[in-house]
Image (spheres, rainbow, N blue to C red):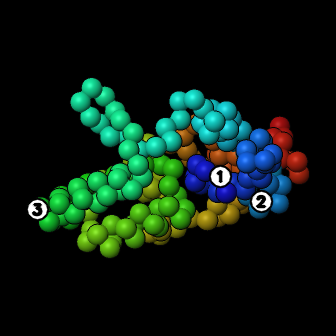
Amino acid sequence: MCPLDCFDACGVVAEVEGDRIVRLRGDVDHPITRGALCRKVNRFLQDRHYSAERVTTPLLRARGGWRSIGWDDALDLAADHLARTRERHGPHAVLFHRGNGSFAALKCLVNRFFNLFGGASEAVGRYCAGEGDYGTRLAFGDCQIHDPIDLRDHSARTLGGRAAAVGEASGYGNGSERSEAGEPQP
C-alpha cells in the first residue's frame, strides 16, 4: 500500500536489492489505480525515504534547539502528558485535529485510540475539504471514507482545494483514463 494513505489506496510494488528499496512502481493488478502512481509516490524514495533531511528519530525541544531521544522515551513522554492532562482537566482538554492523509486504517486506529482514552475535543472540518466532507455525507451517509469504487461510474466530480495533477493516481481527480500499463490516456 502507498505510504500516503490517501483516497486511492494505491497498490505499490517495491523492488528491493539487499536491504534497500531501489524502485517503486504501481501494481498493475490494483483495481483502482491499475499500475499508476501519483507524482508524490514516484519521487517518494529520493524526496522523502532516502532524503538527508528525513527525521528518523523522535526529537525533543530543549534549550538551544532540538535533541534526539529514543522511541520508548518519546512514547512515554507523550503518554505522561496525555494522562496528566486527562487527570487534571478531563479528556476533552485534548484537542485532536485530523488532516488529510489518514483515510484508511490509520483513521480508524486514531479514532479507537481516543475512544479508549475517554474522548477528546476534535476540530471539525479541514482546511480545504469541509465542502467535500459535507457532500460525501449527503451522498453516502456518515462514513469515515467511502470506497473509491463508488466514484468509478460517476460522470461528474468536484474537487475543492486538491492538487489533482499531483495526486490521485487513479485519475478520479482529473477524469483521465489509464491504459493497462497505467499510463494516462488523452
SS label for mark 3: helix
Q: Nearer the viewer, residue 18 or 181?
A: 18
**Marks 2 and 3: which is nearer the front?**
3
Q: Do the CB atoms of the residues marked 3 and 1 lie less than 8 Å apart?
A: no
Q: Which residue is mark 3?
A: 88
Residue 137 coordinates in the image, percent (x, y): 46, 63
When asked about the image quadrant of residue 134, the answer is bottom left
* Percent of width and height locating residue 149: 68, 63
In the displayed structure image, the side of residue 158 where residue 14 appears, left or right: right
Task: Give 95 or 132, whichever is nearer the viewer.
Answer: 95
Q: In whole angstroms, how far apart are the C-alphas of marks 2 and 3? A: 49 Å
Quadrant of res 117 = bottom left
Three-letter amino acid code of the residue under disc 3: Arg
Q: Nearer the viewer, mark 3 or mark 1?
A: 3
Mark 2 residue crowding within 10 angstroms, few (<14) / some (14–19) / many (20+): some
Q: Earlier in the sequence, mark 3 or mark 1?
A: 1
* Left or right relative to 79: residue 72: right
Q: Which residue is mark 2?
A: 30
* Sequence order check, earlier mark of 2 and 3: 2
Q: Earlier in the sequence, mark 2 or mark 1?
A: 1
